[in-house]
Structure formats: structure tokens, C-alpha cells
Amino acid sequence: MSIPPVKAPRVRVPRVAVAGVVRRRQGLGEHLAHFLVRHGAEVPAFLASRPETIPEAQSVLARHGIEAAGYVGLDALLAEQPIDALVIASPAATHATLLEGALAAGLHVLCEKPLLEPVLWGGDDDVERVASLVDAFAERELTLVESCQWPYTLPAYRELHPASATQQPRHVEMWLSPSSRGRDMLVDSMSHPLSLLQALAPPTADQLAGLSFSTVRRDAGRLQASFRYPTASGGVVVRVRLESHPEQPRPAGFAINGLAAARRIRMEDYALSFEDGGRQVPVPDPTERLVEEFVRTLRGEDRPVGPQRGAAIVWRQGALREIVGSFERLTA
């Protein structure tokens, strides 16, 4: 893929299109659009999977005061709408085409995790493809962000457990409740603990050590992945517990060195908090914090940091491929 090295200008009021406003399983697209507008961007257009879904998506956006035109296909949208960025909240199978289309058009991108679906049996190498995309976006000075929200909860976690701020992580446990099962639980969820680990300490090796699973059933509704995350201080013992849970509120949280933070969701207004031992602290919506940072980056006020740096995105794709590939080999 040959892309001319044209630099993308930063803009005062970014115009951002959203792919995946209406999703049957996760439904993050409408919230991303809402947060974009709240933090000073415009959402004049969106991508739909087919023409019949456009009225539904327009109705969803209208609940947030957003009036946007719908299109099927990025080329059709770009022919009528001058935009600066694309938010990709559509299923992972659509990401590669949209990422490459956005790159060719000179658009900044915020993409749902995982950046690419892990390719394990034949086909292109997804890790090399992600590395190529990261390099190409950087060459054109285009922002590329993967939507991993959990690192943005660390300030609230440290408020709940002040002693954690001075501790080296030795043991990390995370529990999540995706709506999927088996292999798909890993694809949907493992970017979260991996990005959280990267925010705590950068990895010092490309591979995880001691990777194992509590079950190797392909349709497992409950699954634990265990491994050692490599760091300069000797590594972190990690356990990730996944349990399929089709409806909100979905149980989730994490513990560092035994200090736990269970996420609580007040469903009437979706207010988040962390709780442990009768203590509770509010958690500013991490998805909103991520979107706010993305908009600031589009304005040239910030640069991606920590788990959003290009090298961190590539490492995370490699670790995800390793985890999913190991599970698939064991269940083949």
C-alpha cells in the first residue's frame, strides 16, 4: 500500500464521522458520537452497514442532539462530507478496510479494540499489518488511537487505594463480563487487561510467559487466562477472569497486588464508581476521557501517550494474537 507523505493539518473544530452508530452487541458508537460533540467536535455524518439502518441510526443520534447524514461506504461519505477524522465503532471484521480507507483519505482515527481481528490460520499477518498501519499513520502525521478505556480509570483506582501509587505491580487480576463466549470473549476483552498492564509498566519482551487457560472448551461461558507479563522489575503475574454476561450492568474490576476495585454502574444515569471494603469513589467515564483526549489531539493540544503510542498498539496486537492463537490451538 503506497500512501503519499502528505501531512494532515490540525483543526480547531474537528469534523468527525462515526462508523457503527447502531450495534446490536456493544452499542458504543452512539456514546462515542455524544462524547465527541460534548468535547467540541462536530459529527456531521456516519457510516451504516446498509441503507435500511440509516433512519434508526439517525434516531439514535437525535437522542443526543446530533443531526447527521448517513452513508453506506466511506467513498460515498467522503464525496459529500469534508471530514477530519473517523471513529470506527463497527465490528472488528470491518476495521481493516476502514483503517486503510481513512489512511488514504488523510483522516485521523479512533478505532474500537481490537484494531484488527487476529488472523491465525492463513491470510495476512495481522501484527505486521498493524505495524504497517501504525507506521503509515505516523508518516502522514495522522493520529491513530485504539479504544482501550481501562487505563483512564487508574486515577480513581489510586484514590481508592492511595498506597498503590508507590507500589511496583507484582500481581494483577482483572474480571470482565463480555456478552460473547469462548474465543470471542478473548478477542473482545483481552485488549483491556493488556492496555492496563502497559499503563502500569512497559513490557520488556515481545511474548508473554506461562500462558494457560482454565478451560479449553470452544463455547466456554466462563474462562480464566493466566500468564506472566514481562517488565524490568521481574514481571507481573496476571489472571484475567471472563464470564459471559449478556446484559448490563456487567460485573468488572481489577486488583493490583491484592488491592481490589470493583466497578459499579448506576443504571439510571450510567454513573461509574469503584468499590472495595465498603469504600467507594466515583470514576469519571473512561470512554469519555479517551474521546476528550482524542479531540484535543485533533486540535494539536496533546499527543497520544502510554498505551496509545504506536509501538504500544503493535505490541498489544501481538500479545492478543498470542493469547487467541494459543486458545485456538488447544481447542482445535
Image (cartoon, rainbow, N blue to C red):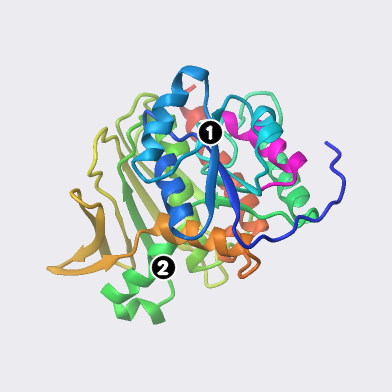
Cα gap from disc 2 to disc 1, whole angstroms:
49 Å
Please indicate whether residue 228 sits to the left or right of residue 273 in the image. right
Quick check: 9 above or below 240? below
Percent position of residue 290, x then y: 48, 58
- Residue 104 visible in the displayed image: yes
- As drawn, the label of residue 69 is 1
The image quadrant of residue 278 is bottom left
Residue at the limit of the structure toward the left, as seen here: 278
- Residue situated in front as seen by the camera: 168 or 109: 109
Q: Amino acid at mark 1?
A: Ala
Q: Residue at x 69, y 40 (%)?
A: 102
Q: Amino acid at mark 2?
A: Arg
Q: Is residue 124 magenta?
A: no
- Residue situated in front as seen by the camera: 159 or 15: 15
Please indicate whether residue 139 sits to the left or right of residue 298 in the image. right
Percent position of residue 51, x then y: 51, 19
Q: Is residue 102 magenta?
A: yes
**What residue span does the magenta drawing correspond to?**
94-108
Quick check: 276 above or below 268? below
The image quadrant of residue 153 is bottom left
- As drawn, the label of residue 205 is none
Q: Residue at x 60, y 55 (%)?
A: 14
Q: Which residue is mark 2?
A: 170
Q: Are marks 2 and 1 in contact (CB under 8 Å)?
A: no
- Residue 204 visible in the displayed image: no
